[in-house]
Amino acid sequence: MEHNLTKEEIRLIQMSWNLMTLKSKTTGEKFYANLFKKHTDMAELFKGDIKEQSGALMRMVKTVVEGLNNPQIIIPALQELGRRHREYGVKDEYYKEFGNLLVETIGSELGSDFDVKTKAAWEKLYDTLGRVMKN
Ligand code: HEM
């Protein structure tokens, strides 16, 4: 993945991710609960068990977060993931709301540890992620 995250932004993302996994084991499930409440059009596309789905999403985000120092390694996997999402019926315009909610959920898990710079770094990361997946 081509990204233009600075070293400082990478550090903020990795630090906040680690802190979040220490604070909460249920971020993924909270995220999907929010998503399904707010976006029934997206909810319809999910066929499987939500606990498994949460696990899959969180594992993928973990892989990306840990791979930020070596982005070229994870690009092909993300492109494949994006192709599969088209098959799942995911429209390009869904990515934005999905991302807003994901960053919001991470933020509410972290509370005051989620500062303005950390938030901006996550938004920048998700933006790039979404772009790679859609291409
Ligand atoms: C950064 C963005 C995203 C990541 C990292 C991500 C990650 C994943 C992963 C790891 C899976 C497991 C299956 C697979 O690997 O193919 C999955 C499945 C899925 N995702 Fe995503 N996803 C993202 C965005 C979205 C968006 C925007 C939607 C829109 C609704 C979405 C809807 C789905 C659906 C419908 C499935 C299949 C569920 C099923 O088979 O029941 N994803 N996603």
Image (spheres, grey):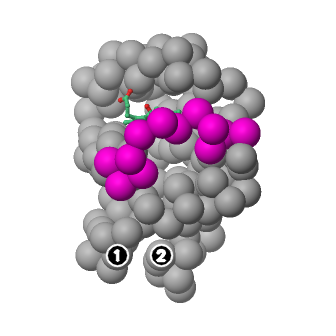
At label 2, the amino acid type is: Glu
Let me know if residue 106 appears in the view: no
Q: Looking at the image, which residue sits at the far bottom?
A: 112
Q: Where residue 109 sits: x, y (%)? A: 48, 75
Does residue 67 lie above or below 55 as drawn?
Answer: above
Quadrant of the snapshot with the N terminus: top left
Q: Where residue 108 sits: x, y (%)? A: 55, 75
The quarter of the displayed image where residue 117 is located: bottom right
Let me know if residue 63 appears in the view: yes
- Of the numbered discs 2 and 1, the one sitting upstream in the chain is 1
What residue is rendered at 72% in x and 39% in y? 41
At label 1, the amino acid type is: Ser
Position of 108 compared to 66: left or right? Answer: right
Q: Where residue 64 sits: x, y (%)? A: 34, 40
Does residue 77 lie above or below 15 as drawn?
Answer: above
Cβ of mark 1 under 8 A from ligand 1: no
Give the labeled residue for mark 1. Answer: 24
Q: Where residue 52 sits: x, y (%)? A: 32, 48
What residue is rendered at 63% in x and 54% in y? 36
Q: Nearer the viewer, residue 97 or 2?
A: 97
Category of crowding for the residue at label 1, using alpha-carbon neighbours closer than 10 angstroms: few (below 14), some (14–19), many (at least 20): few
Give the spatial CA distance, label 2 vs label 1.
Answer: 7 Å
Q: For the magenta stretch, what is the residue range? A: 41-52
* Magenta stretch contains residue 55: no
Give the labeled residue for mark 2. Answer: 109
Position of 44 compared to 129: left or right? Answer: right
Quadrant of the snapshot with the C terminus: top right
Does residue 131 lie above or below 113 as drawn?
Answer: above
Helix, strand or loop at mark 1: loop
